[in-house]
Image (spheres, coloured by chain):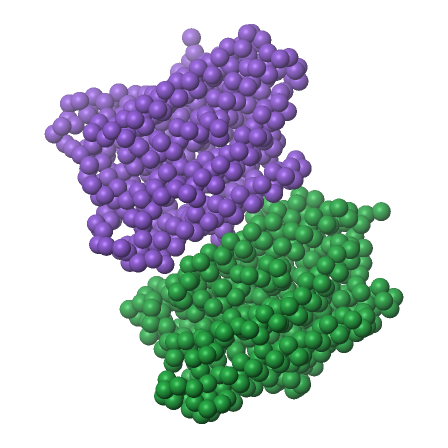
Amino acid sequence: MMPMHSLAAATPEIFLAAAICVVLLFEAFFGARHRGATATLTLLVLAIGAALTVAFADVSHSVTLFNGMYVADPLAFVLKLAGFLVAAVTLLYSRTYLENRDILKGEYYVLTLTALLGIFVLISAGSLLTVYLGVELLALSVYAMVAFDRESGVAAEAAMKYFVLGAIASGMLLYGMSIIYGLTGTLSLARIAAALTASHSLGIILGLAFMVVAVAFKFGAVPFHMWLPDVYEGAPTSVTLFVGTAPKIAYFALAMRLLAYGLPGVAADWTRMLMPLAVLTLVVGNVVAIVQSNLKRMLAYSTISHVGFIVLGFVAGTRSGYTAALYYMLVYVLMALGAFGVIVLAGRKGFEADRLDDYKGLYRRDPLLALVMAMLMFSMAGVPPFVGFWAKLRIIEALWQTNHLWLVIIAVVMSVVGAFYYLRMVKLMYFDEAPETLPATVRSFGVRFTLGINAAAVLVLGILPAPLLDLCTRVIR
Amino acid sequence: MHHQLLSILIWLPIAAGIVVLLLGERNVGAGRWVSLAASVATLALCVPLWGDFNTHTAAYQFVEKAAWIPGFHAYYALGVDGISMPLIVLTAFMTIPVVIGGWRVITKRPAQYYAAFLIMEGLMIGVFSATDALLFYFFWEAMLIPMFLIIGIWGGPRRVYATLKFFLYTFLGSVLMLAALIYMYVKAGSYSIAAFQALPLTLTEQRWIFFAFLLAFAVKVPMWPVHTWLPDAHVEAPTGGSVILAAIMLKMGGYGFLRFMLPITPDACREFNMLIIALSLIAVIYIGFVAIVQPDMKKLIAYSSIAHMGFVTLGAFVVYEIVRATGGLSGAAMGMDGAMVQMVSHGLISGAMFLCVGVLYDRMHSRQIADYGGVVNTMPIFGAFMVLFALANTGLPGTSGFVGEFLVILASFKAGFWFSALAAVTLILGATYTLWMVKRVVFGPVGNDHVAKLTDLDGREFLILGVLAAAVLLVGVWPEPLLKVMEPSIRHLVAQAVSTKIPV
């Protein structure tokens, strides 16, 4: 029997699991009478969760629990705090959106919390089983969220597509895991790492290939990206906001735990598998984004291109590369929060503001939203003084350290291609005149304030990038 | 104050720009005065910069250094030498006419207009004063954003095409340079430009880096054949945008050649110097011919800018041919001196020419040469200024245009007769396109009713053109102080350029 205090390292998950039950019961008994109370309660849960995580975290070293199934290390600590923050911000942004469209239901919040729990389990996964548990918990919650607007056919279609393709990916992951398990006789990632040192048996390569495909699918790397634009476009924007941000943290952790920490001995093999994926992802994401007329879809392809950069960090396969990927992922999540936040705020019921043309002359209608969006677009394009620049820089540095000349060239040239469609957004908002009177944007002070902070963070972290960069360097071992 | 002078020069205009933005369009009257005060104060701060500059050393002066990103070994490191200092002064100087020039003319979102120019001024001074490559790149790229908005918001009918082309062209060049800078960081363990200059590089490495730099700087200068964004950008940009584009931004390309390319990849420069010289001569001759046939005044001046910037690159790279032909270094410094003077001079002259076109455009809303004729009859004072700047543009002795071109032609004569002969073609071509334009616009009988109704310069316009005219003449008659300021740095640069960095 384990003493109680030793469970302290798992505080975030334990608290979250308990809180989910509370929120669910609260919704069942009081939800109908006090609309919106569940939302406040959920935000409270997230705040308390973050506080408890900080209070109980022992960040000086890593702790393993449950026979090595669960790992609490500095990386997990940072990712979980990021998870709390991101979930809270997405809920803040989406409240008015849900209200306007009559889908402000308690289940939405419960699903967000279960998804977050899945993310946390994945972040702290120490064995193949925990990995799978986290992946599925996250995926199932997100499928339901995508289909949350029952009236919407597009959303149902997107959820169906996501579910079917997601099931295939899960199957791949399980199959790959079973092969690795069969060859090493253990589910513990630490023991697998110790067992697999540069033995190049065909079986390992096969298992590895399946796992790489699963990771690529979850990230949305080309050619396993087909679900991503459909889900981003079809889901209610508030869900897109969530799907586009928080799970990225988990999938980074997935790649980290499974590949970087779990299979370092065969790193040469999986970096070689990831390389063509990264190149394809960069090219397809950036080029296809150019021809999109739907902003959510465009940002979906833009996500794919950013995923290309994150994967490049893994292609480098060094500590520096993982650090770069972590930094890129956090920066991307920050930018995506803002960008989808703008879409959430720019629309009204019956006007989703998801076409590019809906942003014509946004500067005239709502200077703040236009400014925030413009900053985010420049940041995503990688132009200083915004933080997106440092993310790209860090990846390129990691690639130079491993002498990937051609990958560097492809990455920088593709970022120029990407600049085109980001600039087009700025053009639409600032240079064009609004075609007709469009509905007003959402004017809730609290949300706009948060959005302003979000954009300010993109600028401030761009001018003074040192703290976040140092943090990323410190938590990757 | 001296140890923070450069920081103040960078951040004062940026802070003022933010203040103007916050004042908003409703308080644009106050915003204008803030802009003017900030730009004049920035120029005033250049007085101690120039006055206390030590002209006997090539070392960086007014040095500042603070940790910026310890993880990257990147510093907020500033400093100036004889190459960057005059360009900073030029930047501060040319922003004032832009602010005054937009005074009553800009009616669309004027506060943002001023803010964009002030922020850009700070960023450009940052480009010239950064001694850390990462900081340099930070300013270099950040500057694209205000320029993109200036052309896109206040530009002409095809502004969107022009500004996207401008941004993407320069962005493509820049990111490859960034890749090269990061490569050298990985090798040198520091982003300091001095460390890059001291870093031994094999010939293969130098070649790659050379071409990455070439693309970045050639686009900015711009050199043939990557010049095509410039005429579009100039034609569509508002007057102030054209002035800054021609006067300062093109100089950033020239500055890049002198600060990065020659000292960091000297062996590759030696290997490919004929390529640069050939491209420069093509710019001088071919683009000169192209300029002749332009029906649009701004486009004509844009092409003339490309031709004149050809002299900058020619002057910088002819040094290798001088060494090859004479075996010595005499005359090498002259070419670089010429390049530098040409940059300063072109900044003044092209800025003034664009302001002249702006004066006409504000009255007639046309840039077509054919819409004018006999302007001197209704605008005699303007006519005098226009002729003066046109003559300076052709390189008339006594104007700043003469000094730079003369030094470069003289230096290329040492390298070989044909270099100088081809370069000297500009004296004919420059006179042809500039004077022919002046003839059609300024002289002759009054072209049409609109011209007949023109009013001459007001006090505001007279002031800015008068000050520029004085500067053009001053540099033309008495270039000595400028040359003296540059001398130690140029000598140092020549020594770096002819050294070899290939590890043995």
Instruction: Identify the colour of chain A in the image.
Output: purple
- Drawn side of residue A411 relative to residue A24, left or right: right
Q: Is residue B317 above or below residue A174?
A: below
Q: Quadrant of the N terminus of chain B?
A: bottom right
- Drawn side of residue B145 relative to residue A372, left or right: right
Farthest residue to the right: give it.
B327
Question: Can I make out residue B50 in this image?
Answer: no
Residue at 56% x, 82% y is B436
Instruction: Identify the colour of chain B in the image.
Output: green
- Drawn side of residue B433 relative to residue B383, left or right: right
Q: Is residue B483 above or below residue A425?
A: below
Residue placed most toward the observer, A55 or B144? B144
Residue at 73% x, 50% y is B206
Q: Quadrant of residue A204?
A: top right
User: Can you give x and y, in whole percent of width and height, for residue A356 in the image?
Assistant: 34, 46
Q: Is residue A329 above or below residue B177?
A: above
Q: Quadrant of residue B105?
A: bottom left
Residue placed most toward the observer, B224 or B309? B224
Residue placed most toward the observer, A272 or B260? A272
User: Can you give x and y, in whole percent of width and height, for residue A78 in the image?
Assistant: 46, 33
- Drawn side of residue A464 relative to residue B204, left or right: left
Farthest residue to the left: give it.
A33
Residue placed most toward the observer, A226 or A120? A226
Residue at 39% x, 21% y is A165
Q: Is residue A178 above or below residue A11?
A: above
User: Can you give x and y, in whole percent of width and height, for residue A377 in the image?
Assistant: 42, 48
Question: Can I make out residue B394 in this image?
Answer: yes
Q: Quadrant of residue B139?
A: bottom right
Residue at 45% x, 39% y is A288
